[in-house]
Image (tube, rainbow, N blue to C red):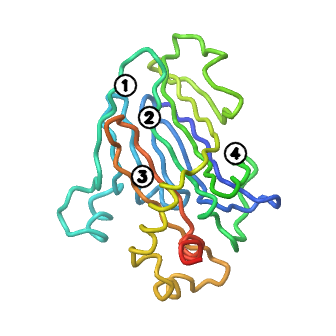
Amino acid sequence: MMGKEHSLRVAVVDVAGRALSSVWRLWSRNEEFYVAVRGLASQFKTSLHSRGNHRHAFVTQGIADQYREPGLDRAVYKWKHPGSGRPEPALFFQIAIPAAGLGTVSSDSVSENTKRLTPPGDREMAVIDIIVDSAAVALRSDMFNDRVSTLDTWETPGGLRFIVTSHVDRATNADMATWRRFVLEQPTFHPENMQSADERGSFDPRTILLMDAGVDGIGRVIDLGIREMSAWARH
């Protein structure tokens, strides 16, 4: 039995409705929550389990063996969240989409049911938040300020409430310096290596950085356009 499922898609788009970020699929099945880039969900996803054991992992061992040394755990990163089982709302996961990493030549129009985010401004990043709460507690009207938009909220058969919101953060000078140093050090962003990754003309190659959860137990990923971040770092 598959269980009860709820899903949504989210992307940063331009005025013509074309995706400037990856299109993110967020869904739950019963009490478990999953996150993946559209088109890659059958290969790689993030699992946020109700007992607090979370991971980024390939969907099958066979797929993992294609990209990693055969036999390694198909989960590339595991972490725990300390808020599992508590009655108060808990932030479990964030997707950060910096303005510097937004696409520039994508012709991929998103579907009508995709939640569309306005592009963040210079030195800003759009952030998608996944929050878990108890469905038995009324949703407080003061939980979010006027900078936060609620994209979707739903309840699970087991009494959880999932809330997906978005907001915009401004990057600090330290953030910008860290991103620039990282991009300049990674072969993925080297201009010579991008030529072979761009064989389809208007195709806009992107990459997802998996961040360590840290002491707060919140999983985070950063959604970046490879060409755009390379040009920005070398500007």
Q: Depth-wise, is mark 4 or mark 1 nearer the camera? A: 1
Q: Residue at x 43, y 68 (%)?
A: 181
The Cα atoms of the two marked residues, 2 and 4, are separated by 20 Å
Q: Label 3 sits on what residue type?
A: Lys
To which residue does mark 2 refer? Answer: 92
Q: Residue furthest front?
A: 173
Which residue is identified by label 1?
A: 83
The residue nearer to you, when weighing 174 against 213, is: 174
Label 2 packing within 10 angstroms: few (<14), some (14-19), many (20+): many
Amino acid type shown at disc 2:
Phe
Q: Position of residue 1 (x, y in %)?
A: 41, 34
- Amino acid, disc 4: Lys
Q: CA distance from mark 3 to mark 2?
A: 15 Å
Q: Nearer the viewer, mark 3 or mark 1?
A: 1
Looking at the rendered structure, which numbered label has been put on residue 115?
4
Q: Are marks 2 and 1 in contact (CB under 8 Å)?
A: yes
Find disc 3 in the rendering and name its residue.
45
Instruction: Give above or below for 201 relative to 168.
Output: below
> Gap in Å between the C-alphas at discs 4 and 1?
27 Å
